Image: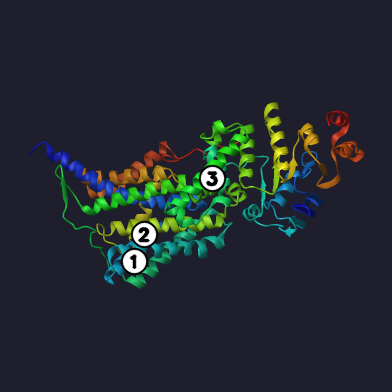
C-alpha cells in the first residue's frame, strides 16, 4: 500500500478554485515530484496535505489511514514532516536548538520530570542534542550549530529546515523547494541527501524548480497547471508529453530532455 | 553624625528596593511567559499573586504548617490559571488579541469578586518564615523575610532558565513562542504549551504572593496594583523577555524605594512611571526588547 495517497483533493479561496481534483500516491522509498508553472497550486497542495489548509474536497491518507485536515502536530505524530518554500524557522533560537526541538516527539518524557530537572530529563536532552549534532553534520551545518538561526543565509536555513524535518523521523517527507537559494555545491549535497533519505525507506514528495535535480531524482513526476493535474509519469515520459510541453516546459523541453 | 549614616540610609533603601523589585520581577515574569505563548497580556496576573497570599493565609489559619500551606496555594492557583485558559481564553481562540486581553481583565474582576465572597474584605498577613528579628548590615536593617523574597525570586529565575534552555519541554515552549506553525510541524501540541504557560505563570504569581504576604498584608484587592506594577516592569524590560522582566522589576523596585527615601513616598509611583515613560520614549520596545526582522 502507498505510504501517502491523495484522492480528489481540492480547495478554493473566495470562490476561486486553487487546486481541483488532484490524485496521486507515493510509496516508501519513492521520490515523487510535483512540478508546474508558478501559481499552479503546488504549495497549496502541500499545505493541504500537511494540515495547514483544510481541503474542501478529497482525502489524504497516510499508510491507509484517513488524515484529511488533521492538525499539523497530529500529522507529525503519524510520521509526516515537511519544509517550507518561505521557511518556518525558530529565528531567535540557536541552529542546534532548532533541530533539538525536532526530537521533541521521540525523546520527550513526562513534563513534570522536565520541570523538576530530573535525571531522565537531562538524559533525554543529551540524547536529542547528540542526534541534532549528527543531523547538522549530515546537512553540512555542524560548524554553525551555536549561531542564532536568524543569522544564517537562505540556503543554509533551507538545509536547517531539512535537518529539523528529519529529526521528526518522518515516514513521509514533503520538501518545498529544498534547493532554492542554494549554490551548485549545496544543491549537489541536497540532491545526495534526498536520495539517501529515500533509500532509507521514506516516501518523499518534492516541489522544486531546479529541473536537473527533479529529472535526476524523481521516480514519478506529477504536473500541475492551473490547479489541475495534467500529466503523471516517469521523468522521460513527462518531459515528452505534448500537453506538458505546451503548458509548462515550452521550447526548453529539448534542453531538459538532454539533461535528463 | 558620622559619614556612615547617609550610606546606611542608601543601603536601607536599596534593600527594600530589591525586595519589592524581586516581587515585581516575578509578576513581570508571569506576564512574559503567557505573552510569549499566546501574545496575550494577562491582566489577571496580579490576581494570581493575591490568590497565593490569600489561600496560604487561609490554609495557615486552618492549622496547616506554612510549607504545606504555600504548596497548596501554588497548586490551587496554578489550577485556576489553567481554568482561566481552558474556560475563557481557549474558547475565544482566533479572536483579536485585544479581545483576549479584555477577557483577562474580566477574569481578574471575577476572581477578585469571588475572593471577596469566599475570604471576606479583611486584610491578612502571614507570619514571617524565619522570625522578624532584623539582621544588621552596615547600619541597615534587613528583614529575614526580604532574604526569602530575593532567594525565592533567584530560585525561580534560575530554575526557569534551566528549564527553557536545558529541557525538551522548555525548548518546545520557546519554539512555540518563536513560530507556532513550525512548532506544530515538529509535533508540538501548542494547545498544551498554552496550558503549561498559564499553569507556570499562575504558580509563579502565587509563590510571589506567599513570599511577600509576611511583609505586605494581602486582601482581595491587592492584585490590581501588583498587576499594574508588574506590567510596567515587563514593558520597561521589554515584553516577552525574561531577562527584561528581571531587569525591569528590579529597576522599578529601586526607583520606588529611592524616591520614597529621598523625596517622599507620595511621589514614588509618579517618579517610577515618569522614568518608565522616558525609557520607553528612547527604547520603545523596552530595555531588552527585540526588533523582529522579517525575512523577505
Instruction: Tell me the residue at 87%/37% (across/down).
Output: A236
Q: Position of residue B34 (x, y in %)?
A: 47, 53
Q: Secondary structure at mark 3?
A: helix
Q: CA distance from mark 1 to mark 2?
A: 9 Å
Question: Can residue A159 be seen?
Answer: yes
Q: Label 1 lies in what chain?
A: B
The secondary element bearing badge 1 is classed as helix
| Residues packed near mark 1 inside 10 Å, few (<14), some (14 to 19) or many (20 plus) | many
In this picture, is A180 found above or below B167? above
**Residue closest to the far top:** A184
Q: How is the image coloured?
A: rainbow
Q: Is residue B144 left or right of residue B49?
A: left
Residue B270: image location, x then y, percent: 31, 47
**Circle 3 sits on which residue?**
A128
Residue B96 left/right relative to B134: right
Q: Are marks 3 and 2 in contact (CB under 8 Å)?
A: no
Q: Quadrant of the N terminus of chain A?
A: bottom right
Contact, mark 3 vs mark 1 (Cβ under 8 Å): no
Q: Is residue B294 left or right of residue A205?
A: left
What residue is disc 2 on? Answer: B206
Total numbered labels placed on residues in the image: 3
Q: Are labels 3 and 1 assigned to the same chain?
A: no
User: To which residue does mark 1 refer?
Assistant: B55
Cα separation between marks 3 and 1: 40 Å
Q: Are marks 1 and 2 in contact (CB under 8 Å)?
A: yes
Amino acid at each position: 500500500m502507498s505510504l501517502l495517497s491523495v484522492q480528489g483533493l481540492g480547495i478554493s479561496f473566495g470562490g476561486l478554485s486553487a487546486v481541483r481534483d488532484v490524485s496521486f500516491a507515493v510509496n516508501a522509498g519513492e521520490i515523487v515530484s510535483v512540478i508546474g508553472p508558478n501559481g499552479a497550486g503546488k504549495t497549496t497542495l502541500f499545505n493541504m496535505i500537511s494540515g495547514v489548509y483544510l481541503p474542501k474536497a478529497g482525502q489524504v491518507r497516510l499508510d491507509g489511514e484517513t488524515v484529511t485536515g488533521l492538525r499539523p502536530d497530529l500529522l507529525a505524530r503519524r510520521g509526516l514532516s515537511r519544509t517550507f518554500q518561505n521557511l518556518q524557522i525558530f529565528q531567535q533560537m540557536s541552529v542546534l536548538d532548532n533541530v533539538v526541538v525536532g526530537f521533541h516527539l521521540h525523546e520527550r518524557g513526562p513534563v513534570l520530570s522536565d520541570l523538576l530537572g530530573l535525571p531522565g530529563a537531562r538524559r533525554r536532552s543529551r540524547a536529542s542534542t547528540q542526534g541534532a549534532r549528527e543531523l547538522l553534520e549530515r546537512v553540512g551545518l555542524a560548524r554553525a550549530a551555536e549561531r542564532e538561526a536568524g543569522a544564517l543565509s537562505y540556503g543554509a536555513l533551507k538545509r536547517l529546515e531539512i535537518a529539523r524535518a528529519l529529526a521528526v523521523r518522518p515516514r513521509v517527507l514533503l520538501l518545498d523547494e529544498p534547493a532554492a537559494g542554494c549554490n551548485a555545491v549545496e544543491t549537489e549535497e541536497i540532491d545526495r541527501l534526498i536520495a539517501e533519505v529515500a533509500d532509507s525507506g521514506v516516501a518523499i514528495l518534492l516541489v522544486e524548480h531546479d529541473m536537473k535535480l527533479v529529472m535526476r531524482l524523481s521516480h514519478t513526476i506529477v504536473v500541475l497547471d492551473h490547479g489541475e493535474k495534467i500529466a503523471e509519469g516517469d521523468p522521460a515520459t513527462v518531459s515528452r508529453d505534448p500537453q506538458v510541453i505546451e503548458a509548462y516546459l515550452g521550447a526548453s523541453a529539448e534542453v531538459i530532455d538532454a539533461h535528463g | 553624625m558620622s559619614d556612615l549614616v547617609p550610606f546606611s540610609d542608601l543601603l536601607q533603601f536599596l534593600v527594600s528596593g530589591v525586595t519589592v523589585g524581586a516581587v515585581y520581577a516575578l509578576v513581570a515574569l508571569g506576564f512574559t511567559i503567557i505573552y510569549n505563548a499566546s501574545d496575550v497580556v494577562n491582566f489577571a496576573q496580579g490576581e494570581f499573586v493575591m490568590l497565593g497570599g490569600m489561600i496560604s493565609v487561609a490554609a495557615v489559619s486552618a492549622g496547616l504548617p506554612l510549607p504545606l500551606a504555600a504548596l497548596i496555594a501554588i497548586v490551587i492557583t496554578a489550577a485556576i490559571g489553567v481554568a482561566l485558559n481552558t474556560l475563557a481564553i481557549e474558547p475565544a481562540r482566533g479572536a483579536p488579541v485585544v479581545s483576549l486581553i479584555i477577557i483577562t481583565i474580566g477574569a481578574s474582576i471575577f476572581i477578585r469578586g469571588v475572593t471577596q465572597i469566599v475570604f471576606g474584605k479583611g486584610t491578612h498577613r502571614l507570619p514571617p518564615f524565619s522570625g522578624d528579628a532584623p539582621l544588621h548590615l552596615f547600619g541597615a536593617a534587613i528583614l529575614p523575610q526580604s532574604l526569602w523574597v530575593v532567594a525565592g525570586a533567584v530560585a525561580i529565575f534560575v530554575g526557569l532558565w534551566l528549564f527553557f534552555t536545558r529541557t525538551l519541554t522548555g525548548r518546545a515552549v520557546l519554539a512555540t513562542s518563536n513560530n507556532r506553525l513550525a512548532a506544530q510541524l515538529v509535533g508540538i501540541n501548542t494547545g498544551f504549551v498554552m496550558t503549561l504557560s498559564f499553569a507556570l505563570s499562575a504558580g509563579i504569581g502565587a509563590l510571589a504572593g506567599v513570599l511577600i504576604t509576611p511583609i505586605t498584608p494581602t486582601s482581595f484587592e491587592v492584585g490590581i496594583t501588583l498587576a499594574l506594577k508588574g506590567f510596567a516592569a515587563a514593558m520597561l524590560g521589554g515584553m516577552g523577555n525574561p531577562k527584561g522582566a528581571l531587569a525591569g522589576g528590579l529597576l522599578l523596585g529601586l526607583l520606588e524605594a529611592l524616591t520614597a527615601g529621598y523625596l517622599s513616598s507620595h511621589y514614588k509611583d509618579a517618579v517610577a512611571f515618569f522614568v518608565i515613560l522616558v525609557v520607553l520614549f528612547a527604547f520603545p520596545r523596552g530595555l531588552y526588547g527585540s526588533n523582529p526582522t522579517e525575512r523577505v
